[in-house]
Each structure stands twice: as structure tokens, then as C-alpha cells.
């Protein structure tokens, strides 16, 4: 039996959609192999979830499940001390961790905008808080912004600070990965006199809000603006005009999490796994 630990209070709605999709893929893979799945939902207040969960610790000690997958909480250090294999998502690949390379997201997204003849670019991107410990959120966010700017300049693309709608201080971090925040951030970017030729959207949930704001403003895509958005393959993103996608496959993430668990059972050295994005028109 495998257990999945999900938080009841940490995730904004947009991130919950991703986690729900990932959990569905995990459940399908495990059940296809005859592995029973139990879901543990931590309903304690967010601040308390950084501390050991007594009921879960007891269940692990009693071997009520054989392994634990953390699809939403990579920084629970106490979970690493449980007497069973544990694996989770993370900002970087490390032992017992599956990571998504956001630098690759930026590289592919900018390549997609270059292919659409853009000479200037903006970014609408959620906070990095889900994959980073709370005390590292600001540093991780700043590093992501810098990576985007550096990748853009390597391609001779113009970037202005006003076109970088990301991270803490722009919006409430707890609601940044929502359609509403995408709507607001596009409006804030587009109110400037100088505007970019293209925009990379770093999250398919906020993309829904960006699309709504574009339709409301009666802009033409690709006539007035080019768009490339991150997309989770198994989460539907309706868009009435053509945009590019940088795709992340939740099923591939689920398979990598399962392989990390198998490696621990087999006592094989595991350095973690990084999941690749793909650029699709």
C-alpha cells in the first residue's frame, strides 16, 4: 500500500487543480499494478503542518502503508525520518525528489516567442512558494525572475521591469496562481504605453485569466500580441485563439515518483529526477 499526503489548507485553487490531476495519474498507475492507495489529508492549520503529524507517524510505524508520496509538500523535513520510503516534489532534483526545471520552461517559452517573431517579451508568472520552503520563497522567486531576464537577453529580446508581473509584492502570494490574478496582472502590464510583442505565462491556471482580459480588451492574438503558456497536459485549457504551449506531463511526474519509491525499496542510489517540459504550438 502507498499513502499520499495532501494538505487541506496550503494550496490556492489553481495549484490544487494541478495536484488533483497529478494524484489522479498516481492513482491510475498504482492501481494498474495492484497497489492499494490511501490518501491522508492534513487538515491542521498551515503553520502546524511543518511539525510532525502524530497520527501519520504512528501509521507509518505500524506499517499501515509501505511508502509515502508527497505530491504537494516537498519541505516536510520530519517526513524524511519516517521508517518507510518517502518521495516528494521539489524545486531541484535531490535524493527522494522529483523536480520540474523552470529554467527549461523559460528557455522553451522564449524560443516559442522568438519563433513568433517577437522582439520584446513580458512574463506573467506565479510565485515559487509551492516548491520552496517558506523562508526561501523570496530567494527562489528572485532567482526565477533573473533566469527569465538572462534567457531573454541571450536571445536579444527586450525586457522591461514593468513587463515582469511575478512573485510576492505584485499580488497576494496565496492567490497568485488563480485566474483572477492572471486577469489583474495582464491588465496591469497592458496599461503601460510601451508593451511587449509577446508574453510568457508561467501557469495554465493564471492563463485563463489572461485570456479573459485579452478578450475583454478586444485584442487580436496573434495580431496585437503573441502568447506562449505553460500547460499541464491532463488539465484542459480552453483558448479561442492560437497560442503556444510549454507542456508538463503529470503522468510522467507520477511515474518518476513511483520509480523513486521503487529505488528506495531496492536500496538503489537515487539522485532525484528532473521532468522535462516540451514546446508545442
Image (cartoon, helix red, strand yellow):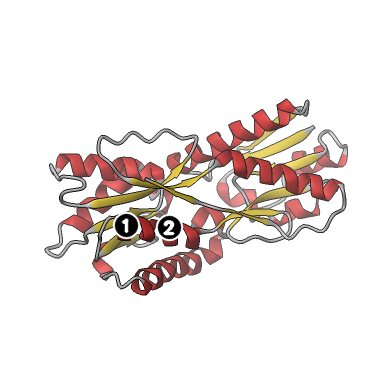
Q: Is residue 166 above or below residue 149?
A: above
**Residue 263 shows in this picture:** yes
Which numbered mark, 1 or 2, is in the foreground of this view? 1
Left or right: residue 102 versus residue 267 is left
Q: Residue 209, position in %: x, y? A: 29, 42
**Residue 8 shows in this picture:** no
Marker disc for residue 33: none
Q: Is residue 219 above or below residue 116?
A: above
Residue drawn at x 78%, y 25% as measured from the top left: 34
Residue drawn at x 72%, y 42% as measured from the top left: 258
Q: Residue 7, position in %: x, y? A: 59, 41
Q: Are marks 1 and 2 in contact (CB under 8 Å)?
A: no
Report the residue marked by disc 2: 108
Residue drawn at x 39%, y 61% as measured from the top left: 168
Left or right: residue 241 versus residue 237 is left
Question: Considering the numbered disc 2 on the image, is that residue within a helix, a strand or a loop?
Answer: helix
Report the residue marked by disc 1: 115
Question: Considering the numbered disc 1 on the image, is that residue within a helix, a strand or a loop?
Answer: helix
Crowd rating for badge 2 (residues with CA inside 10 Å; few <14, some 14–19, many 20+) = many
Amino acid at each position: 500500500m502507498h499513502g499520499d499526503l495532501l494538505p487541506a489548507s496550503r494550496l490556492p485553487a489553481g495549484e490544487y487543480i494541478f495536484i488533483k490531476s497529478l494524484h489522479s495519474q498516481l492513482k491510475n498507475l498504482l492501481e494498474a499494478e495492484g497497489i492499494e492507495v490511501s490518501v491522508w489529508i492534513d487538515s491542521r492549520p498551515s503553520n502546524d503542518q511543518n511539525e510532525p503529524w502524530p497520527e501519520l507517524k504512528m501509521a507509518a510505524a505500524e506499517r499501515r502503508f509501505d511508502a509515502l508520496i508527497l505530491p504537494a509538500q516537498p519541505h516536510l523535513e520530519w517526513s524524511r525520518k519516517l521508517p518507510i520510503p518517502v518521495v516528494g516534489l521539489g524545486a531541484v532534483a535531490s535524493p527522494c525528489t522529483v523536480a520540474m526545471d523552470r529554467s527549461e520552461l523559460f528557455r522553451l517559452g522564449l524560443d516559442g516567442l522568438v519563433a513568433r517573431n517577437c522582439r520584446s517579451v513580458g512574463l506573467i508568472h506565479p510565485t515559487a512558494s509551492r516548491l520552496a520552503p517558506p523562508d526561501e520563497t523570496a530567494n527562489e522567486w528572485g532567482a526565477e525572475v533573473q533566469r527569465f531576464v538572462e534567457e531573454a537577453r541571450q536571445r536579444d529580446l527586450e525586457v522591461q521591469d514593468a513587463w515582469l508581473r511575478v512573485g510576492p509584492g505584485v499580488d497576494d502570494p496565496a492567490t497568485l496562481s488563480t485566474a483572477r490574478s492572471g486577469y489583474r496582472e495582464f491588465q496591469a502590464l497592458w496599461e503601460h504605453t510601451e508593451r511587449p510583442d509577446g508574453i510568457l505565462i508561467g501557469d495554465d491556471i493564471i492563463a485563463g485569466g489572461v485570456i479573459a482580459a485579452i478578450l475583454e480588451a478586444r485584442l487580436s492574438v496573434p495580431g496585437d500580441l503573441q502568447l506562449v503558456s505553460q500547460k499541464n497536459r491532463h488539465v484542459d485549457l480552453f483558448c479561442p485563439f492560437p497560442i503556444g504551449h510549454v507542456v508538463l506531463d503529470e503522468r510522467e511526474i507520477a511515474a518518476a515518483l513511483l520509480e523513486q519509491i521503487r529505488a528506495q525499496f531496492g536500496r538503489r542510489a537515487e539522485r532525484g529526477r528532473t521532468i522535462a517540459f516540451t514546446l508545442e504550438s
